[in-house]
Image: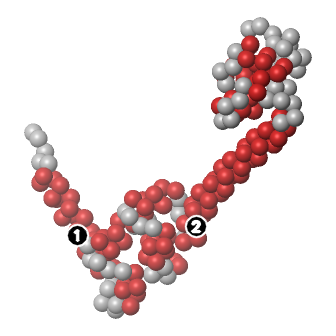
Amino acid sequence: MTDWTDIHQDFTKELKKKWKELRFNRYQVQEWIENACLEPADAEFAFWLKNNKDYTPDEIDSDEIEELRDSYNNGKLGSEINSVLLQAKTKQKEKDWKNINSNFTPELIQKWKDNGFTYEECTDWINIHAPNDQNQAIQEPEFYAYLRDEIKLKPEEVLSDNSADLVDLREHFREYEQRELEAKIELFPKQG
């Protein structure tokens, strides 16, 4: 690797590597630094000028370089802010499930989602239980999917209907699961 300090005294191996990673050769780097008044640390800025703004080093005059740099930095800052906001929203969504019950894990959240529950629907089903029973309830998304899809019950119906006993419904669910399992076994008999 040849030294690029003859292009600019502040060139380091790391800065040279950055320019090369962005597909600039020695000649192009020299043009950007000498003609566009860029610095060795401006590899990403040069890449942006070339690819996003379609500039060549000869097209940029020294009067507009700072305006372009401001535009680049604002855009970069904007995308960094958007990235941080997106991460915060994602964390907030996960955190929201913890508002339902502090024992929700990412795996449990995914199980509820896989069973077709939204955050709001999950909240409604878990809230039919007393706080002491909610830790068990969050472990059973399949049971609540059964109540919703097979029995056609809504959370408020379980609360208001005195005949809807969760113990009995769980027993019916276990029987339903057993029948489903037996049906699958009949479809795919064991080969001997």
Image quadrant of residue 158? bottom left
Q: Position of residue 119 (x, y in %)?
A: 49, 68
Image quadrant of residue 8? top right
Q: Earlier in the sequence, mark 2 or mark 1?
A: 2
Helix, strand or loop status at disc 2:
helix
Residue type at tag 1: Glu
| Between 10 and 68, the one nearer to me in the picture | 68
Residue 46 vertical placement versus 181 (above, below)? above
Residue position for label 1 = 175
Separation (CA) of disc 2 from disc 1? 33 Å
| Between 72 and 190, the one nearer to me in the picture | 72
Residue position for label 2 = 96
Name the image quarter holding the C terminus: top left
Residue occupying image coordinates x 52% and y 77% = 132
Q: Position of residue 72 (x, y in %)?
A: 75, 40
Q: Total of numbered circles in the picture?
A: 2
Q: Position of residue 179 (x, y in %)?
A: 18, 64
Residue 173 vertical placement versus 105 (above, below)? below
Residue occupying image coordinates x 29% and y 78% = 152
Residue type at tag 2: Asp
Say left or right for 101 vs 43.
left
Say left or right for 123 vs 66.
left
Residue occupying image coordinates x 52% and y 56% = 106
Contact between marks 2 and 1 (CB within 8 A): the answer is no
Helix, strand or loop status at disc 1:
helix
Q: Does residue 177 appear in this view?
A: yes
Image quadrant of residue 48? top right
